Amino acid sequence: MKVTSVKELAAAIEAGEQNIEVEGTISGSPSITLPEGATLSGGTLEFTAKGVRLTKNNTLRDVTITTTDYEVAVYNSTSLADAGTFRLNNVTTVGQVYIIAEGELKKVRVEADHVFVKSADVRGRVEQPHGYGVDVLQGGFTLWNRNPDPDSLFTATLRGISAGTEETPVRGSGIFVDGYTDREGKLAGGKFTADLIETDTIVTDGGIVQGTPDKITGGVFVLGGAIVDRVENNGPVTTHGPNDMVLDLWGRTPEWVANEAITSTGASGIGFVNFGDMGHLEINAPIVTSGLGARGFNVYDGSVQSAKFQSITTHGDGAIGIQVSKPMGSLEVTGDVRTTGAEGLSLVKGVQMPLQAIGVSIKPGGELTALTIGGVVATEGDHLVSFEVLEGAAVNALSVGGIEAHGTGSVTTKIEGTIPAGTL
């Protein structure tokens, strides 16, 4: 049924129409709830409060749904036990996409292909998962199993998901997926699983006040209640605000591949930070950060089987290039690891603390089966160490193209832990 006005749209929904096609632009409608099994397609729907509410087995296709930035453009009912499958194909929104399982809802699946959240502001959301000393802002595109029942299951396949632009960055996280977690950010109930999360361009600015110790966002954030077979970033991921991680893993994924630039311009914005269980990580593009304390790659918790980077460059004071403080497998950088800053504050597990912009830092408890850097490790700041392996840390196989320290009073190496003899 084709509709061209608020009245016709309301009549189609009231009649339980299964195929509703919007012609042109319809403005001024209150929030609508799609009948079970219904498809909404075509045209533009302009709301000023909540937008389209899904119920069961609904499809949104070739449609634009807009509301105010701080509202939800697409959301769902939680009154049924099983919501079936929601399909979102070629959907553009202004406002958040927020699909959850909670209350009566225990089972839901989302299949999304080319969804673009042009802008959204989720800073006012009360519900924020907690872990590792911080709360996490929701995303412009949020899929979240909030049901404590361990039998509850939220599954998804996501392709071509975009969020934000340079002119309209998402105010919050970009892509956010999670299950039901405890206060420590660990799975404690219903889980979220996806066979694929594939993203296009992501641009965020979480709007967190600089210096805040206990709140973060992520450009692409796989949280502790989520298990994802493969994450693939086929567009650039850029974060601009303080405490805006670019890529962040608290959950589990066997494979995460990024094929375009990973960029942060905000304070304490880390290129990739791991607290979860990572299989193979591969970043086939530069990681570049330019904020105070904005590090390149961190392994603070969890595990990483292997990681490979093209290059890592940081420009802020306190912005370490690579920091590892847990055992992991092999780590390879085909190009350079470079830092240009000196000492400055950075957010570490909910605490702002002074760090030095060391090129590579293997902390106590950190152990790598192999570390290979094809280019150089270089620092520009004063009174720094370019490459350090501290007491209680180990690198079992090591190859570095070169180590440089250009700042006043800086040194190339500090080796207190274990490295193979004769490698430096």
Image (cartoon, rainbow, N blue to C red):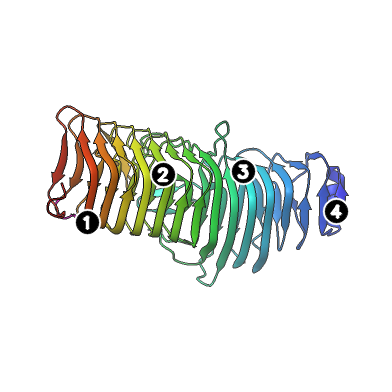
Q: Secondary structure at mark 3?
A: strand
- Identify the amino acid type marked 2: Lys
Instruction: Tell me where residue 173 appears, x and y as whole percent.
Output: 50, 45
State the residue at coordinates (37%, 38%): 212
Q: CA distance from mark 2 to mark 4?
A: 44 Å
Q: Nearer the viewer, residue 333 or 74?
A: 333
The residue to which callout 3 is attached is 117
Q: CA distance from mark 1 to mark 2?
A: 37 Å
Name which quarter of the figure residue 184 lies in: bottom left
The residue carrying pointer 2 sits among few (fewer than 14), some (14 to 19) or many (20 or more) residues within 10 Å by Cα, namely many
The residue to which callout 4 is attached is 12
Q: CA distance from mark 1 to mark 4?
A: 67 Å
Left or right: 83 with respect to 214?
Answer: right
- Pointer 1 and pointer 4: residues touching (CB < 8 Å)? no
- Identify the amino acid type marked 3: Val
* Residue segment shown in magenta: 391-396
- Which callout, 3 or 1, points to the residue nearer the camera? 1
Instruction: Tell me where residue 72 appears, x and y as whole percent.
Output: 63, 46
- Which callout, 3 or 4, points to the residue nearer the camera? 3
Which mark is on residue 215?
2
Q: Which callout, 1 or 2, points at the residue further toward the start of the chain?
A: 2
- Identify the amino acid type marked 1: Ala
The residue to which callout 1 is attached is 397
Q: Which callout, 2 or 3, points at the residue further toward the start of the chain?
A: 3
Q: CA distance from mark 2 to mark 3?
A: 22 Å
Instruction: Tell me where residue 353 appears, x and y as whole percent.
Output: 26, 40
Instruction: Tell me where residue 5 appears, x and y as whole percent.
Output: 85, 42
- Identify the amino acid type marked 4: Ala
Q: Secondary structure at mark 2?
A: strand
